[in-house]
Image: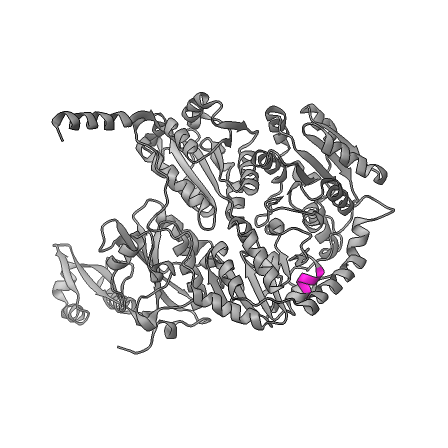
Amino acid sequence: MTSLNHKDYIKEDVKQDYTFTVYTENRIGILSRIAIIFSKRKINIESLNTSPSEIDGIHRFNIVIQETGDVVRKLARQIEKQVEVLKVYFNTNHEIIWQELALYKVPTDIIAEQVEVERLLRQYGASAVVIRKDYTVFSVTGHREETDRLVTALEPYNLIEFVRSARVAIIKNSRGFHEKLKEFEALEPSEEVVENEFLNKGDNVFTM
Amino acid sequence: MLVKDVLQTKNKETADLISCSGSEMILKALIEEGVETVFGYPGGAIMPLYDALYDYDGKIEHILVRHEQGAIHAAQGFARVSGKTGVVFATSGPGATNLVTGLADAQIDSTPLVCITGQVYAHLLGTDAFQETDVINITAPVTKWNYQVTDAAEIPEALAKAFYIARSGRPGPVLIDITKNAQLQLAEFEAYKKCSHIRSYRPAPKIRIGAISEAAEVINKATKPFVLFGQGVILGGAEQEFTAFIEKSGIPAAWTILGESAIPSAHPLNVGMLGMHGNYGPNVLTNECDVLIAIGMRFDDRVTGRLDKYAKQATIIHFDIDPSEIDKNVKADIGVWGDCKETLPLLTELVKKHSHAEWLQRFSELERQEIETVIHQELNPETGELTMGEVIRTLNELTNGDAVIVTDVGQHQMVACRYAKFNSSRSNVTSGGLGTMGFCLPAAIGAKFGAPERTVVGIVGDGGFQMTLQELGTIMQSKVDIKIIIMNNRFLGMVRQWQQLFNDKRYSSVNIESPDFVALAKAYRIDGQCLETRENLRSALQTMLEHEGSYLLEVMVGKENNVFPMVPQGCSVSEIRLK
């Protein structure tokens, strides 16, 4: 762990990966409203994941883009301005734990015959999801570079199909959303909630 | 409790639940929200609502416009002068898409609207049914919130949220799209409950006292402080709080065109207009002040000119209710989040009483230069063609600054905003952020409904008038009393001015021919006249103002007059040109 706080990771004028974590109401149309905020500014979304959060009725988005800190902060405020968005966090790769899931479909006969493939799969920690006569599907979770490397490695062995999920990320310093939601539901929300801030941890509170 | 009593209560409860159609629920909701006037246009998918409206004659006044764009601009005019939420009805498909320009205008100018559009039956959604369009997705970027209702039971809550969202915080337009089956469907209707809290929505950020005291400290040390204010002061109903602040601190204040009437034109600390065609002093001195205090304005590019040369020497304090505005265009040294009605009194309390006589003198000096070089000639020409400025000056003299002035977009808009005098707030209605030509005529109609006791004067160019002139039909049918001044220069004047100054006078598609506007008005049973000479200006305006009912005055103004001063695009505010 490092002693740096949120502010130290943000580079105003340098583009780097940022992961937004967005808590929203589970409403039709909110995905499109969020997507518009990026497309309006001609910003490409590298990866987008949405699924129910730990709280019933609240969805969690993970959106990855490459941008400068200045742009990211403005985007966060625009997203949070949407009526059905509860809270937005943005973090650099240093501040999150993330994974992507990849599936690889390879001909079973090659896998069975070639010893090298077996070594490869061990090396990448792949696990078999399904084994059929004609093909086998392996899965790997990891960062983009890791799953990419296995694609390259499997290509000589007649890789039939490959797919990768969006990034899912956990913020290292987050305490989850349950407590925050209570504050949101109160008519007089706490200072921290109304202030649109990003992390509720002492030094890491980001003052804009 | 006895069984009998329980049963009785139960019966009473069921009696409170009335079975009611979706359409009736909409109208009941509107009544509960205090809506008396609606602007709209019927059509297939919204017929059930219009059928229910038939029984609400005398309770809700429906103004039949000639085009849905007219309905929404009218609702904007209504909202801007009254401070209430404007309401629009339109049908699905083309009816709804015709609202888009007005929604975009209301979104960028923060005008509270609730638009109700009809939609095809829920079971037809996505089948490319007759008059089906994806209104929710089309309008998502230009609404503060929108929602599609497919079941009557959702209507009361959807409308309650719509009104709450439209008017709270930074106001904006909301669209509720209601499928035809939901309008027809019968459902149980309990008493309507207004909405006052949505967990995912924070209309106003919490005020941080620390930021205010920091701001006060900086202001108290300033020797050349300068206030810029926008519509936020009006939207927050904070005109008095604002006046108290500038009067105590003695700081000169300049306005964006949407903030213009927040303080009277004659206020000694009102130093004039900001921006591309604003006054000389406010623009030049933006780059000389030591503290710049922006209140309820958003540093639009038409106000700031070139950003990297904008007020670099000053400490910038920005008051706004919308956190996303702070640091968006101009980085604030101190950002004060919150409703200025609450933040300003806190600030006033902390600032020292001051009068910046020397600094004010700088504004007066530059004003004198501007009067000599530009204003005097524009307002008091003795020879040559009529100027737009002298029309506005004479109008000021006749109305004493008590009229509501509604303008369109272009040269006449800049001239009207520069020279019109106002005594009270909510008197200047114009399309600022979006610059929507065709805004004036319908917005003036709406403004009259919003302030029936006031004189409403619409000032429009020959180009903009032709964009929405069909609304003359609305004036005729609804017997609206508005005064229309067409400043006719036989050109699309602002574009022509740019072509003259920046494109070597290559006049490309700016020559515009017009019909006989007076005859056209007559066809709609509206009186009017065309004025070509200076000597009759005063009497023509007098006739217009005294006329019972609407009146159209066409004024033939100089063909190639330019609006000055001007900050050319890409230049800094201090590079403003006087000629």
Residue B559 lies, in percent from the top left, at: 78, 44
Is any part of residue B239 visible from this angle?
yes
Q: Is residue B222 magenta?
A: no
**Residue B111 as seen in the image, left or right of residue B122:** right
- The secondary structure making up most of the magenta span is helix
Q: Residue A10 lies in what quarter of the image?
A: bottom left
Numbered range of the magenta stretch: B280-284
Work out which quarter of the rendered image holds the C terminus of chain B and state it. bottom right
Q: Residue at x 80, y 35 (%)?
A: B539
**Residue B496 as seen in the image, left or right of residue B439:** right
Q: Is residue B283 magenta?
A: yes
Q: Along the line of sight, which residue is nearer the eye, B558 or B542? A: B542
Q: Residue furthest right?
A: B383
Residue B433 lies, in percent from the top left, at: 57, 50
Residue B306 lies, in percent from the top left, at: 61, 64
Q: Residue B230 lies in what quarter of the image?
A: bottom right
Whether A30 is drawn above or below B153: the answer is below
Is any part of residue B185 visible from this angle?
no
Q: Residue B307 lies in what quarter of the image?
A: bottom right
Residue B58 lies, in percent from the top left, at: 49, 23
**Residue B48 as seen in the image, left or right of residue B79:** left
